[in-house]
Image (cartoon, rainbow, N blue to C red):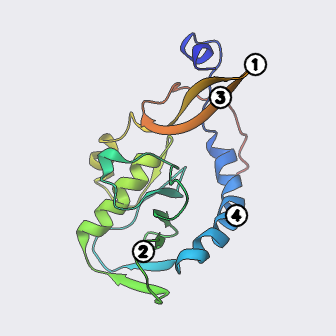
Amino acid sequence: MQDLMNAGIIQINIDPHTALLSMPNIIKGMLPVMSRYNVPVFIHNETAVDFISSDNPVCYFKSGTPISKIVPYNVGNFDDFELVFPITPRIALYLDTRKQTDALHREVRSRQTIDRINEVVSLFADRYIFSRRGDIETLASNYFDKGPVPDFERSIVGNGLVQRISYKIGQPSALSNAWEYPFRR
């Protein structure tokens, strides 16, 4: 499949509309996993900086990973991961399986913490970042040519071929829309 993509015969893009429609099911599916380990926390942003959101707002990755080393959606056996989901400019759902807490709500006054969450959301964005901030271009420009992209690995097993698809952060394979959605006004 990677050969077909490299040759330009097929394009695989994340369809933002379908991704957004699938989010409720993804979250429903992850809730049992999340609750097995820890209580998700609603972070109340008490800084002067709003949370941003994107067309791919649910971000999860291995806990404590520096931004430059994040491998999207790869959390191994789900024993060690972070999940970030900005719900509003002031509230985000957050889970870190390494940190035990009984609190359902936590006020955050650290600009550094909010900036990290915003960087992760910006990194996971497919095409759109939503913000009330006027300076979002600076943050978005750091990641405008990056995002979760499929990475294919093939193996011959017996008489067959096994293909594994994982994700990495890289340049999107196609920058043009492969879909059209008429939105009602």
Residue that mark 2 sits on: 90
- Real-space Cα distance between discs 2 and 1? 54 Å
Q: Nearer the viewer, mark 2 or mark 4?
A: 4
Instruction: From the image, state whether disc 1 or disc 4 is nearer to you.
Output: 1
Of tags 3 and 2, the one toward the viewer is 3
Measured in 3D between alpha carbons, the distance from the residue under mark 2 to the one under mark 4, in whole angstroms, is 25 Å
Q: Amino acid at mark 1?
A: Asn
Mark 2 and mark 1 lie on one chain; the one further toward the N terminus is 2
**Is residue 52 depicted above or below 168 in this figure?**
below
Which is nearer the eye, 37 or 110?
37
Q: Nearer the viewer, residue 31 or 25?
A: 31
Confirm or deny contact between disc 2 and disc 1 (CB under 8 A).
no
In the image, what residue type sits under mark 2?
Arg
Q: Nearer the viewer, mark 1 or mark 3?
A: 1
SS for tag 1? Answer: loop
The residue tagged 1 is: 159
- Callout in the foreground (2, 1): 1
Residue 84 is situated, as x and y percent measured from the top left of the image, at 47, 64
Label 4, on which residue? 29
C-alpha distance separating marks 3 and 2:
41 Å
Amino acid at dot 4: Gly
The residue where tag 3 is placed is: 163
**In what quadrant of the picture does the N terminus appear?**
top right
